[in-house]
Image (cartoon, rainbow, N blue to C red):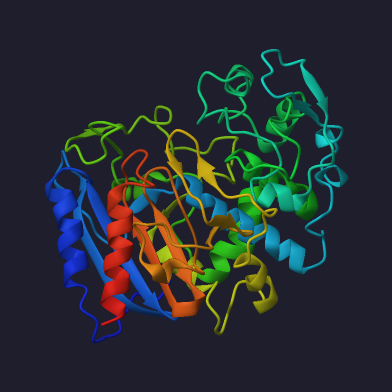
Amino acid sequence: MTDMTVINSDHDFGPLHAAMQRYVDLELLPCISTAVLRGRDLIDLHCVGWADREAEIPLTADHMFRMFSNTKLVTSCAALLLYEEGHFQLDDPIERYIPQLANRQVLRPGATDPEDTEPASSPITIRHLMTHSSGLSYGLLDPGTLIFELYTSNKVSNPATSLSEMVEVLSGLPLTYHPGTGWEYYVAIDVVARLIEVISGQDFGDFLKARIFDPLGMVDTDFWVPSEKRDRLVAYYDGADLMDPMKGGLTCIDDMPYPNAYQQPIPRQSGGGGLVSTLPDTIALIRGLIPGEGMLLRPETLELITTNQLAKGLYIGFPGFVDLPGKGHGLVGAVSLEALSDEPPGVVGEYWWGGMAGTQWWVSPDHDLAGVVMTQRLMSTFHPFANELKKLTYDAVST
């Protein structure tokens, strides 16, 4: 287990703690735990709110959270371990390892028929997959579109299917754009998880345990929660109004994304969103990416992580939810090339990501600063609390 000793500092995190308490009091968040690191030293740790509001169970540092898309950090790091060992190059076509994804077809602009396609101008590469620029989709964030209907009707995200079965389904579906020419959040990191299985010859979960969880002491991270730990799983909540994130009110949705989720092993070990973890385990993972003894990845690999890998002129964004101009994508998450109007200027140079229920992390190599955030509110990745939290963190360490 990672060291959770808080190093005394002269920084005042009181305003940060008070702000997070306010979000809980206003019933905007059920709970939130935050950790701030300077280098590898933990300089602030704070937990507030309820792990279960109905049962009035206070949140503690060892509670377990559905990580959703923060699983992508683990999967990307796992792939980069194989990259460092020379098992693949970033610009290798994925079809070299997963032949089912060869000879891709791309939907023509405005297509209303799945057969209205043209051949892809280039193969999908591993770099495309790791940066969400391959033309694959999620079929989650674009309801009403042809690709949404195709992914939904073909049950691409069905948890009862394995990663290899998912690839078979994807092999019959078109891309939304030519590889490398766009950016769309999608199932690609699950394809990367399958790549790890193919190259290593191991079950994806077994590879993660042997190469990441055990070496880093991540004792509570897995794709399911065994019965002896189930009382530590934080309840999951939805806000009062998706379009008004500052409207108070929370409803428990523990049966999302499906009944009894995370309470037993399932075939789909989703590299894009399947893990459950804790604040200490996530701190251990982030420490593994900070220069020092026992680094998970080599310094030259960290350079790739912190460098924008998208083609010139491409930025990340979630149509209908949030536009993020000035945000590129490295090999494990977003890269802040510019600060948005509501962000502190210190975010430039950060790499970061978040999960659908509000778990988040960021690392700023320029400021020798990192943060980990845990909460469980549906669709809260870009909730106002996140920007306020980061601003107050930078304010605290700059005084």
Q: Is residue 313 left or right of residue 23?
A: right
Q: Quadrant of residue 78?
A: bottom right
Residue 113 or 5: which is nearer the viewer? 113
Taking depth in this image into account, of 75 and 342 the one nearest to the observer is: 342
Q: If the image is split into quadrants, where does the C terminus sit?
A: bottom left
Q: Is residue 325 left or right of residue 386?
A: right
In this view, 309 is above or below 295: above
The quadrant holding residue 17 is bottom left
In the displayed structure, 353 sits above or below 392; it is above
Which residue is at a point 71% across and 26% down the rendered structure image? 169
Residue 272: x percent and y percent?
57, 44
Q: Is residue 385 above or below residue 145?
A: below
Q: Is residue 203 visible?
A: no
Q: Quadrant of residue 76?
A: bottom right
Residue 99 seen from this side: yes
Image spot of residue 323 (x, y percent): 47, 44
Query: Is residue 155 found left or right of 240 in the rendered image?
Result: right
Residue 332 percent coordinates (x, y): 59, 58
Q: Residue furthest top?
A: 113
Relative to 283, say whether 377 is above or below. Answer: above
| Quadrant location, the N terminus | bottom left
